[in-house]
Image (cartoon, rainbow, N blue to C red):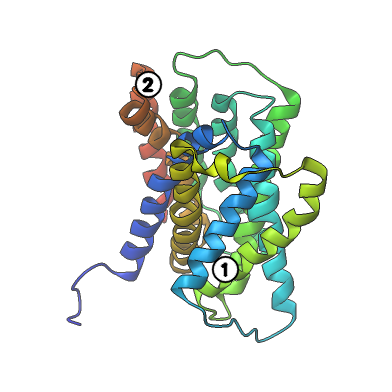
Amino acid sequence: MVKGAGLSAAGRGHALALGTILVWGTTFIASTLALRTLSPNELLVSRLVIALAALFLVNRQKLTLISRKHELYLMGAALSGVVLYFLFENIALTYTNSSNCSVIISTAPFFVAIATRIFAKEEKLTRSFFVGFVIAIIGVGLVSFAGHTLKLNPLGDGLCVLAAISWAFYSVFIRKLDGFGYPTLLITRRIFLYGLLFMAPLTLVFGFSVTPADFLAPSTLVSILFLGVVASALCFVTWNTAVSILGPIKTSAYIYLTPGVTIVFAWLILNDPIHPLAIVGAALTLAGLWVSQRRR
């Protein structure tokens, strides 16, 4: 390849992170449609099964670990980034509204930065990161609460905070695994497998009574396939690849864009109106993302 042709490694990392967020920003709509038929627990288990099947079809190679200790990292990533994150978020939505949830979970980059600095010894946190964080969160708040009233719910909002913290620990585990040169797809597949194993005992608590008719409903079927194949199997691979290139701090900053992406697709798919404040908020979010990515 000619030097300079195509995207640089950093450019590819930013493209993967942005592409992943563009997909993840639509998952709220897909999940809303699927939850009309399935419970949060049933949705997560079904999503994991489909994601695992897709990744096994793509690559059946066995993952061979250098050290048994790395198995603990994989289990930690599955518990924090798959089981706890999605359960905290889904349960939180039964207590608080989606606007509150989107703002609070968008603070995940802050927790990622703190966790990776402490546990993974990542690069020092710069003034640009904190300034960008403040600007972006103000923008996220305008996007999420435009036309809505702020309603605090200690339990629901607290669960959203726990979801953001869970994602921070997931980022630490992924960063540690990245240093050993394992194929990203195989790592992601093993994480989903552990996630499914961790969910097995929880199904006894929450219940699991899905019938073929539940899946065959057109909106449910399309939503489940999208969440399993695209948002999980594909996007967890692209996100983990972006983390390996950019590091968890720069990659996680793209989470700021999620609420903005959600309202755009809600406008396109569900014909939801876009409030003028949301446009201002989206601009501030982009500005915050740009500032946070600066080196100084």
Question: Local crowd at mark 1 within 10 Å, few (<14), some, or many (≥20)?
Answer: many
Q: Do callouts 2 and 1 mark residues in contact (Cβ within 8 Å)?
A: no
Q: How many marks?
A: 2
Q: Is residue 3 above or below residue 223?
A: below
Task: Give the residue drawn at x 69%, y 40%.
Answer: 88
Task: Give the residue drawn at x 37%, y 26%.
Answer: 270
Q: Could you say which disc has been placed on residue 189 in the image? A: 1
Q: Is residue 128 above or below residue 89?
A: below
**Which of the image's four quarters has the N terminus?**
bottom left
Say which of 231 and 260 sits in front: 231
The amino acid at mark 2 is: Asp
Q: Assign a secondary structure to mark 1.
A: helix
Task: Give the residue drawn at x 45%, y 23%.
Answer: 142
129 sits left or right of 113 in the view = left
Task: Give the residue drawn at x 50%, y 42%.
Answer: 216
- The image quarter in which residue 104 lies: top right
Say which of 216 and 116 sits in front: 216
- The image quarter in which residue 209 lies: top right
75 sits left or right of 291 in the view = right
Q: For residue 184, say whether it is visible.
A: yes
| N-terminal-most mark, 2 or 1 | 1
Question: Local crowd at mark 2 within 10 Å, few (<14), some, or many (≥20)?
Answer: few
Q: What residue did someone put label 2 on?
A: 272
